[in-house]
Image: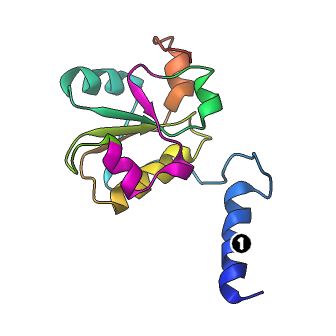
Amino acid sequence: MTHVMKCVLLIFLSVFNAGAFAEPIVPVPEQIPGAKRVDAETVIEVAGRLKNLVIVDSRIPDDRKIGYIEHSISLPDAKTNCKSLAKIIPGKSTPVLFYCNGVKCGRSVVATKIALQCGYKNIYWFRGGFEEWKSKEYPFLHE
């Protein structure tokens, strides 16, 4: 096995915890440098103030069956890259908000970091995610 193949295998195993459907093992930090961390109330405020806000649901499609924030676009972290972001975000300065299931879910962390690497400048990160949204009994939709 080549060195490159070993590295790819190690990355795969660390991200997917050696299980086909396991949640990714991504540490969920308190902050992501370059992104503004927001809570549920700030999501509502920002969405009301910034009419061009793009809300990205970084969870897998099955999670949206439980519910999702209205007007959010499903783009799982595993499918997030510069090309897929460009399809849903009009410009690098367009405000964009990423969320996933909550503080134990690293999917929005991954997606936010990818967006930063792609050059997006106006990024909001909803760390509490859908778990916080639902616990505060804010309205949501089902697929």
Q: Is residue 29 visible?
A: no
* Colour scheme: rainbow
Identify which residue is drawn at 60% across, 33% down. Answer: 61
Give coordinates of residue 124: x percent, y percent.
33, 40
Q: Is residue 73 magenta?
A: yes
Q: Which residue, given by chain and number where applicable, does mark 1 sit on? A: 10
Where the N terminus falls, by quadrant?
bottom right
Where the C terminus falls, by quadrant?
top right
Give coordinates of residue 134: x percent, y percent.
54, 18
Left/right placement of residue 14 relative to residue 70 reads right
Identify which residue is drawn at 66% across, 74% down. Answer: 8
Total labels drawn? 1
Amino acid residing under circle 1? Leu
The answer to whether residue 73 is above or below residue 2 is above
Span of residues in magenta: 69-87
Residue 49 occupies quadrant: top left
